[in-house]
Image (cartoon, rainbow, N blue to C red):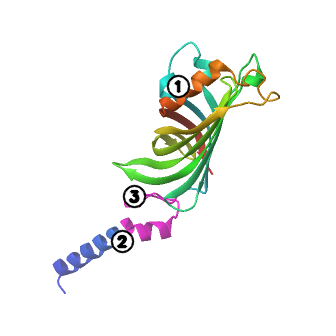
């Protein structure tokens, strides 16, 4: 074998070794924690995502009651696999002057995780139940559409933004003296409740600052 053929053979063997080192299987076997350029479009998520959530309806982004109308709470997502998860949010808007006027909202639903144009994206739907003691009535909603995206991520910490639409499907006055002494057949509360039902659709925006576990 000539020296030229021997050098060609060595060059070919070196190229094959380089290609093998770049393959996902070889890279994972050598170092499971090492990221590769051929990573799956949607990596397997952690089992839980827990965070603090700030939420507002789009009709109440600004105004004199900005602080009172702000909902603050906890968001928990239980991932059932690489794409599907169940989300639950418990939100409160406490009134510093009268605890009996606290507003509370419980939301739950399913989310689908994907990656669009390189951005981690979430699509979901669900239902909400809300008690507005300050307005003397309760409401239930359906949420046919919700979309979210990861704005920032470093390690297990993340910031996610969600927006969607919900529609009122039921609501009544809180006619119980021990719970809401001012809401029993309250005329102003009745008018506000009727207005909510006449304008059933409401947009909302949620900002989640959390951690993947």
Q: Quadrant of the N terminus?
A: bottom left
Q: Is residue 162 visible?
A: no
Q: Position of residue 176 (x, y in %)?
A: 78, 31
The magenta segment = 20-45
Magenta-drawn stretch contains 150: no
- Label 1, residues with CA under 10 Å away: few <14, some 14-19, many ≥20: few
Q: Which residue lies under the disc numbered 2?
A: 20
For the point 57% across and 47% down, the residue is 156
Which element is circle 1 on?
helix
Q: CA distance from mark 3 to mark 2?
A: 21 Å
Of callouts 3 and 1, the N-terminal one: 3
Q: How many marks?
A: 3
Q: Which residue lies under the disc numbered 3?
A: 41
Q: Which residue lies under the disc numbered 1?
A: 195
For the point 50% across and 44% down, the residue is 143
Residue reaching furthest to the bottom: 1
Residue reaching furthest to the right: 178
Magenta-drawn stretch contains 23: yes
Q: Position of residue 59 (x, y in %)?
A: 48, 24
**Nearer to the camera, 187 or 46:** 187
Which element is circle 3 on?
loop
- Which label number is shown at residue 142? none
Q: CA distance from mark 3 to mark 1?
A: 45 Å
Magenta portion: prevailing SS class = loop
For the point 52% across and 32% down, the residue is 197
Disc nearest the viewer among 2 and 1: 1
- Label 3, residues with CA under 10 Å away: few <14, some 14-19, many ≥20: few
Q: Position of residue 42 (x, y in %)?
A: 43, 58
For the point 25% across and 75% down, the residue is 12
Residue reaching furthest to the top: 64
Of callouts 2 and 1, the N-terminal one: 2
Q: Position of residue 182 (x, y in %)?
A: 75, 20
């Amino acid at each position: 074998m000539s020296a030229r053929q021997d050098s060609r053979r060595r060059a070919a063997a070196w190229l094959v070794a380089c290609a093998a080192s770049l393959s996902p299987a070889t890279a994972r076997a050598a170092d499971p924690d090492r990221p590769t350029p051929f990573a799956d479009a949607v990596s397997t998520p952690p089992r839980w995502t827990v965070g603090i959530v700030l939420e507002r309806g789009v009709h109440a982004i600004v105004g004199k009651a900005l602080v009172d109308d702000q909902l603050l709470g906890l968001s928990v997502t239980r991932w059932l696999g690489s794409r599907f998860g169940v989300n639950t949010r418990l939100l409160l808007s406490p009134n510093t002057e009268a605890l009996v006027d606290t507003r509370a909202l419980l939301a739950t639903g399913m989310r689908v995780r994907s990656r669009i144009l390189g951005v981690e994206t979430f699509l979901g739907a669900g239902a909400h139940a809300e008690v507005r003691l300050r307005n003397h009535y309760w409401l239930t909603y359906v949420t046919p559409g919700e979309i979210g995206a990861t704005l920032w991520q470093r390690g297990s910490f993340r910031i996610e933004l969600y927006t969607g639409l919900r529609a009122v499907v039921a609501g009544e006055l809180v006619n119980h003296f021990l719970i809401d002494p001012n809401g029993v057949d309250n005329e102003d509360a009745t008018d506000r409740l009727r207005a909510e039902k006449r304008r059933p659709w409401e947009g909302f925006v949620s900002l989640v600052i959390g951690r993947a576990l």
